[in-house]
Image: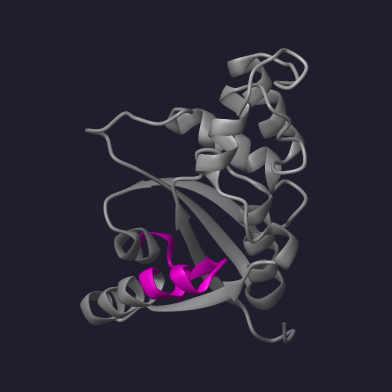
Amino acid sequence: MADNLRVRVLYPGSFDPVHRGHVDVVEQAHELFGSVVLAVMYNFEKQTGLFDIDERLDLARQSLSHLPDVDVQAHTGLAVHAALEAGADFIVKGLRTGADFEIEQQMAQTNHKVSGIRTVYVPSRPDLAFVSSRFVREIAQYRGDVSGLVPPAVAAALEARFGAGDAEKSGESA
């Protein structure tokens, strides 16, 4: 990042839970732009998910505490409204696969049309391209080892939620 360039970006998502792929996107955005808002998006009317909003905020803050000028905030509604409220210049999205691009491009074009805010894509690291919150939740539910997929605070929270154990050793399968 150029020393004289200071851009604020918003990275929206449900982050239920935050995983190493999310952390990678924030680290890349931080390196490129300097100031990142991780927007934990939620719907008041649909209190669904593994972790409630306060838990997701706490886990994200713990997972990103090594980065200065990264702010974790809760937002409801549209990502473009969150970006405007946060004073973001751009929305950042991580891309794992070509399928991600197809979905994200349509959202980015719609967001730009309705708000003028552009979206910037960062590619995931190849060794993290397969990680998803859905798979992390499923593996943890069956007491599989997710320590390589999530930051330590999240691994501990998942263990507290589902218990510890190796599914293969206990006779269960994922």
What residue do we see at 66% from left, 21% from top?
Answer: 143
Q: In which quarter of the image is the N terminus?
A: bottom right
Residue 172 coordinates in the image, percent (x, y): 64, 18
Q: Inspect the magenta stretch and tell me whether residue 43 lies in it.
A: no
Q: Can residue 155 be seen in this view?
A: yes
Residue 97 coordinates in the image, percent (x, y): 54, 69
Residue 24 coordinates in the image, percent (x, y): 69, 60
User: In the image shown, does 21 or 169 lie closer to the viewer?
Assistant: 169
What residue do we see at 61% from left, 35% from top?
Answer: 59
What residue do we see at 50% from left, 39% from top?
Answer: 16
Left or right: 50 in relation to 79: right
Q: How many numbered callouts?
A: 0
Q: Quadrant of residue 115?
A: bottom left
Q: Is residue 91 visible?
A: no
Left or right: 117 in relation to 167: left
User: In the image shown, does 40 or 146 lie closer to the viewer?
Assistant: 146
- The scheme the figure's colours follow is one colour
Above or below: residue 46 compared with residue 72: above
Above or below: residue 105 compared with residue 96: below
What residue do we see at 55% from left, 38% from top?
Answer: 17
Q: In which quarter of the image is residue 149?
A: top right
Q: In which quarter of the image is the C terminus?
A: top right
- Range shown magenta: 85-103
